[in-house]
Amino acid sequence: MKLLKLITLVSLLIGIISCSNDDNTATASEKRINKQIVLEAIEKVFDGQNLTLVDTYYADGYIQHNPFIADGKAGLIAAIQNMIDNGIRIQREMPRVLAQGDRVFTHSKLHFIQNGNIINSVIVGDIFRIENQKIKEHWDVIQQEPDPIVSIANNNTMIDGEGNTDAQISSSDLNRNINTATTIINSVLGNGQLDLVSTLFQEPYIQHNPNIPNGTAALINFLTNNGPLDLDIKQVIAEGDLVVTFNHIISFNNANIDMFRLNEDGKAVEHWDIIQSIPDEADFAHDNGFF
């Protein structure tokens, strides 16, 4: 159990200086800078385990929501030092990074390496809030990578697929995409309005949840058997043709990251998710809660 908790430390990636689309007055240049800083911080501080750079990227009063990591910069340092002491290194794939407003989202697959061997692999979605060009707050959702990696149900992995954050999307189309994604979560998953599937999705619909086949028929079948759900959307981050929602699935006390790729008509054509069971509050390393 101690090793498992240590492994969940991975979710503390690093983010810095976020920006938004036109409606939040941030420029494309600012977004590029934000992403560059995030990737640099991840590479140097967390994956690179360079504790001397923590103050460079993290704000005083840093707020942690990963349930197994203590609050503040001291908690981050202790988490990284724990991995160093146990001889654990990280090998990462990061196919997607989104920035909007003061938030940065990263979609990653991490291998934990010890004595030259992979001891665990997880899929991680991280959200960072930036304040005064430093990381002020962090949330994450972590799911064990399935075995086999390529889903028998849909022939996809949890991180492959498309998505273009550099796609030229107008503010109105971005808002339309956000509305599509949030309607899927609130109305289809939350209220069981399966009649909306034909208006919100378009075939061929590509599924990355390892337990659900491709196509909207499989989605309707899954939701018929598992919904409607009591849920609450906590955060939304959108850039290019991707929209990420961070949700509390109250029915199962799970945290979910759901990410949709929208086509030029604003319909969902691809979906990824990451699901984590929320531990008991008594087991949290801080008093900040998961959300």
Image (cartoon, helix red, strand yellow):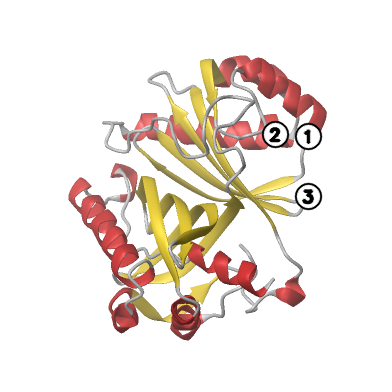
Q: Which of 235 and 8 is in front in this view?
A: 8
What separation in Å lies between label 1 and label 2 (alpha carbons)?
6 Å
Earlier-in-chain disc, 3 versus 2: 2
Q: Check the picture and name the quadrant holding the N terminus.
A: bottom right
Circle 2 packing at 10 Å, graded few (<14), some (14-19), many (20+), is: many
Q: Is residue 88 left or right of residue 232?
A: left
Give the label, 1 or 3, closer to the camera.
Answer: 3
Query: At 29% from the left edge and 79% from the top edge, which residue is drawn?
Result: 53
Circle 1 packing at 10 Å, graded few (<14), some (14-19), many (20+), is: some
- Residue 233 is situated, as x and y percent measured from the top left of the image, at 61, 48
Circle 3 packing at 10 Å, graded few (<14), some (14-19), many (20+), is: few
Q: Residue 252 carries which label?
A: 3
Earlier-in-chain disc, 1 versus 3: 1
Q: Which amino acid does label 2 sit on?
A: Leu
What separation in Å lies between label 3 and label 2 (alpha carbons)?
13 Å
Q: What residue type is labelled 3?
A: Phe
Q: Check the picture and name the quadrant holding the C terminus.
A: bottom right
